[in-house]
């Protein structure tokens, strides 16, 4: 998979593509623990696929921060 940045194609793992898609389309307030758990399973499966296809691991700090934000929100809801 490739992402397009300023006319250049840069290799991008499938995990990163899906994270971009979900961050853009699902509001933080829309996540529930069951849906978040399913999403985590999808990411684990995509990581395995990326490994099999030799895709580079391309962790992004912004995506990691977004995921932490969702986790904190869900934890706060569960503890309320």
Image: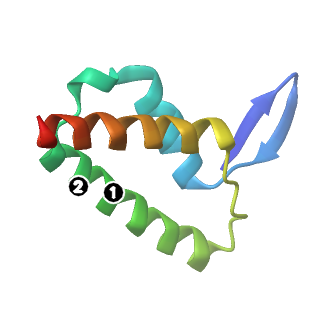
Q: Is residue 57 above or below residue 18?
A: below
Image quadrant where residue 56 sits: bottom right
Identify the residue under disc 1: 40
Image quadrant where residue 52 sits: bottom right
Nearer to the camera, 10 or 41:
41
Which residue corresponds to the image point at 81% horizontal and 44% vertical from the top-left? Answer: 10
Going by the image, does 4 lie left or right of 16? right
Q: Is residue 23 above or below residue 63?
A: above
Which residue corresponds to the image point at 35% horizontal and 39% vertical from the top-left? Answer: 72
Which residue corresponds to the image point at 38% horizontal and 22% vertical from the top-left? Answer: 25
The percent coordinates of residue 41 (x first, y second) are 30, 62
Going by the image, does 13 lie left or right of 77? right
Nearer to the camera, 45 or 37:
37
**Residue 80, disc:** none
Image quadrant where residue 13 sits: bottom right
What separation in Å lies between label 2 and label 1 (alpha carbons)? 5 Å
Q: Secondary structure at mark 1?
A: helix
Going by the image, does 29 lie left or right of 10? left
Going by the image, does 13 lie left or right of 10? left
Identify the residue under disc 2: 37
- The answer to whether mark 2 and mark 1 are in CB contact below 8 A is yes
Q: Secondary structure at mark 2?
A: helix
The percent coordinates of residue 77 (x first, y second) are 16, 34
Q: Is residue 3 above or below residue 14?
A: above
Q: Residue furthest bottom?
A: 52
Which residue corresponds to the image point at 49% horizontal and 35% vertical from the top-left? Answer: 66
The percent coordinates of residue 68 (x first, y second) are 45, 43
Q: Is residue 33 above or below residue 38?
A: above
Quadrant assignment for the C terminus: top left
> Which class describes the residues within 10 Å of circle 1: few (<14), some (14-19), or many (20+)?
few
């Amino acid at each position: 998979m490739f992402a397009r940045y300023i006319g250049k194609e840069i290799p991008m793992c499938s995990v990163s593509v899906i994270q971009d898609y979900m961050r853009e389309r699902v509001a933080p307030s829309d996540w529930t623990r069951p849906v978040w758990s399913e999403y985590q399973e999808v990411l684990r499966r995509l990581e395995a696929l990326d490994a099999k296809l030799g895709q580079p691991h391309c962790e992004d700090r912004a995506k990691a921060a977004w995921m932490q934000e969702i986790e904190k929100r869900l934890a706060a809801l569960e503890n309320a």
